[in-house]
Amino acid sequence: MCRNIRPLNNFEPPATSSEVSAAALQFVRKVSGTTKPSQANQAAFDRAVHEIAHITQHLLDELVTTAPPKNREVEAEKARERARVRYGA
């Protein structure tokens, strides 16, 4: 999976539409193999991002969990610590 796509479920406050769109954009970039599509492919690229963001939002709205919501700052600090261990200080 693309390292730039972050889990969006079970956060307080819930994921914003911009976070969902950013994840959809990263997914489409990864699948298409390009960060900037040609003019001929721009409409298809944009449509895919929009549709994936829409479906992702539906998924997040319907997921159910009994786990307590995660804190964004705590999760970000955990990710930074993993990066420090992985890549050194």
Image (tube, rainbow, N blue to C red):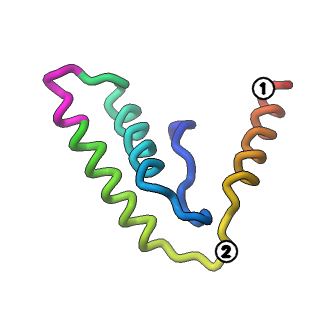
How busy is the neighbourhood of tag 1: few (under 14 within 10 Å), some, or many (20 plus)? few
Q: How many marks?
A: 2
Q: Earlier in the sequence, mark 2 or mark 1?
A: 2
Residue furthest out toward the bottom: 66
Question: Which residue is identified by label 1?
Answer: 87
Q: Which residues are magenta?
A: 38-45
Which secondary structure lies at badge 2? loop
User: Is 57 located above or below residue 81 in the figure?
Assistant: below
Is 52 contained in the magenta span?
A: no
Q: Position of residue 29 (x, y in %)?
A: 37, 32
In terms of image quadrants, where is residue 12? bottom right
User: Is 29 located above or below residue 16 in the figure?
Assistant: above
Task: State left or right for residue 39 relative to residue 31.
Answer: left
Question: Which residue is identified by label 2?
Answer: 67
Q: Position of residue 38 (x, y in %)?
A: 21, 20
Q: Position of residue 4 (x, y in %)?
A: 54, 37
Residue furthest out toward the top: 38
The residue shown at (51%, 37%) is 2
The residue shown at (17%, 34%) is 43
Q: Position of residue 62 (x, y in %)?
A: 42, 73
Is 40 contained in the magenta span?
A: yes
Using the image, tell me which numbered label, if any, was put on residue 16.
Answer: none
Which secondary structure lies at badge 1? helix
Task: Identify which residue, 74 or 4, lies in the foreground.
Answer: 74
In terms of image quadrants, where is residue 37? top left
How far apart marks 2 and 1 lie (CA) works out to 31 Å
The residue shown at (13%, 23%) is 40
User: Is 17 located above or below residue 59 in the figure?
Assistant: above
Inspect the image, locate mark 2, and give the three-letter code of the amino acid beneath it.
Ala
